[in-house]
Each structure stands twice: as C-alpha cells, then as structure tokens.
Amino acid sequence: MPVKIAEGLSMLQIQNSAGITVNLVLLHDSQNVILFDTGWPGQLETINEAIIDERLDLSKLSMIFITHHDMDHIGSLASIRSTNPAIRVLTSTGEKEYVQFDKLPVKAYGERLNQVIKSYEKNTGLTIEQPISDQSAKKLYSNFLTTVDEVLEDGQELPYCGGIIAIHTPGHTPGHCSFYLKKYRTLVTGDALNIEAGQLVGPNPIYTGDLPLAMTSLKKFSSYKIDSIICYHGGYLTSPVGMNSAIHFLI
C-alpha cells in the first residue's frame, strides 16, 4: 500500500506472510523512477502492484538503491531486475560483495544458515561442503544472484530527483548506507534508525552486528537538515521543527 509523502516521493508499505510490514521508498520525476530496497523474496508482484497504484510500473524503473544486504532488503532484487536488465543497482562500497553474494551474508550462521543449506541440498540433490566458505555463497543463494552497477562513496551526491546523497552508516551491517533526499530534506534510514509506537529509536541491538559503531554512524546525520525520516521498520516520521534534535537525543 503506497503512502504519498510529497509529489514524486512515496512510501510503499509491503507486508510478508507473517504480517510484518516494511517500508520501501519510491522516488520519481519526469526522467527517473527509483526504488530503495526490495522487500523479502517472492514479493515482485506485490511491489509491482504498489508501484502501479502510484500510476507507474516496473517497466519505468531505472534504478534501485540498496541500503544493505539483509534478505528483507534484497530478497526481491534479482526478480525485479529480471523484468528489465537495464535497471541499475547502486549500493555502498562495503555492501557490494554481499549484495552480489561474493561473500556469505554476515548474518548467515546458526539455524538461519542451516535452513538455507537444507533448502539447497533438497532442491539440487547436492551437498555443500562444511565448514561453509564464501565460495559457497553463490551456490546457496543462486536464486538471488545479481550484480551491482555502481558503488557509492560516503557523501557522494547523485543528481537524480533533486539530489540523493549516500551516507555510509556502518554498524548494522559492515557497509550499511542511508540516503538523504536533498529536495525533500528526507532521510531514508534503512535499518540505521527505527520507529516504534510513533517514536524514533536507534538500531535494533538484536540484529545489529556492531552496535557502538552503528550509534557512532548516526552522528553523520547532523550534517544535513532533516525534516522527515523514512525508516524501513516503522515508516514515516516528521516534525514541524525537523528531526535533527530527535536524532541528536538518541546519540
């Protein structure tokens, strides 16, 4: 279900089978249609329907920006890209290898990894060698393989839809990246920030690999005038006085 925030900026609320909602961002103008993150695996049609509700469709999609490689963020990336190979994928320098599965996802361990291995062996009849190496990543995640077209440096500004600035915010994952939408003074946080019960909160400690680093990364947001925030988990939050003071309070 899309939520229109401003002309050319919408939030796509996508729900999985467990009833968990995530919030993708759709940005567009006369030249570009841009998606930020891609939900869980198998959500191609759901995402397309949400985009159609905004009087657009996947055939118009020109770029996908990825905040980080957790499966709820890149799950439908390869399937969306398969509809149009011309779609460009952009992410941070620290996430490229994981998004392309040149390396095992950083959270692929324990029962989560065991489930992936069992599924692979059941579907292929092949056995994965133990211990699991980075070289096995492309085998285990073969259904999700795609390539990154451009890696973004910290602070790099791209001239699309009024300006998009990449802000490296490592901690949740090694290369986590947030994005500042200059025209809208809006911050796309990925999992660097969350919203719970209408309140802005920090990164979830349970799922954050390096919490002290993740909290330190939040200091970078002070360089930008932020009127509104879109959190992947929690949605949209704004204030008449802006959101910088709320972020500063968390730090």
Image: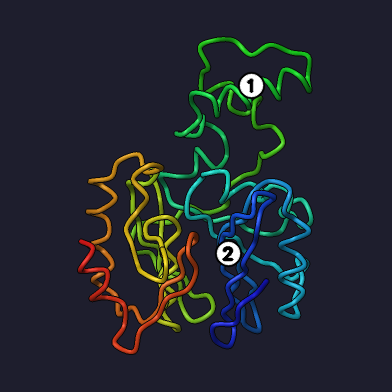
Where disc 1 sits, the SS reads helix
Judging from the image, the colouring scheme is rainbow
Q: Residue 5: x and y, percent?
A: 54, 82
Position of the C terminus by quadrant: bottom left
Structural crowding at the residue carrying mark 2, measured as other residues with C-alpha within 10 Å and reported as few (<14), some (14–19) or many (≥20): many
Q: Classify residue 38 as left or right of residue 247.
A: right
Q: Earlier in the sequence, mark 2 or mark 1?
A: 2
Residue at label 2? 24
Query: Which residue carries the number 1 mark?
Result: 117
Left or right side of 143 for 95:
left
Badge 2 marks a residue whose secondary structure is: strand
User: Which quadrant holds residue 201?
Assistant: bottom left
Q: In the rendered view, would you say 121 is above or below 17?
A: above
Q: Residue at x 75, y 66 (%)?
A: 58
Q: Position of residue 46 (x, y in %)?
A: 74, 60
Tell me if label 2 and label 1 are in contact, CB under 8 Å.
no
Residue at image location 49% in from the left, 53% down from the top: 91
- Name the amino acid, label 1: Ile
Report the residue at 62% width, 25% height from top.
Answer: 115
- Which residue is at the far front? 197
Q: Label 2 vs label 1: CA separation?
A: 29 Å
Q: In the image, residue 28 lies at what x, y percent?
A: 61, 78
| Identity of the residue drawn at 64% across and 21% down | 117
Residue type of the residue flagged with mark 2? Leu
Q: Nearer the viewer, residue 73 or 168?
A: 73
- Tell me: residue 17, above or below residue 200: above
Q: Is residue 152 left or right of residue 10?
A: left
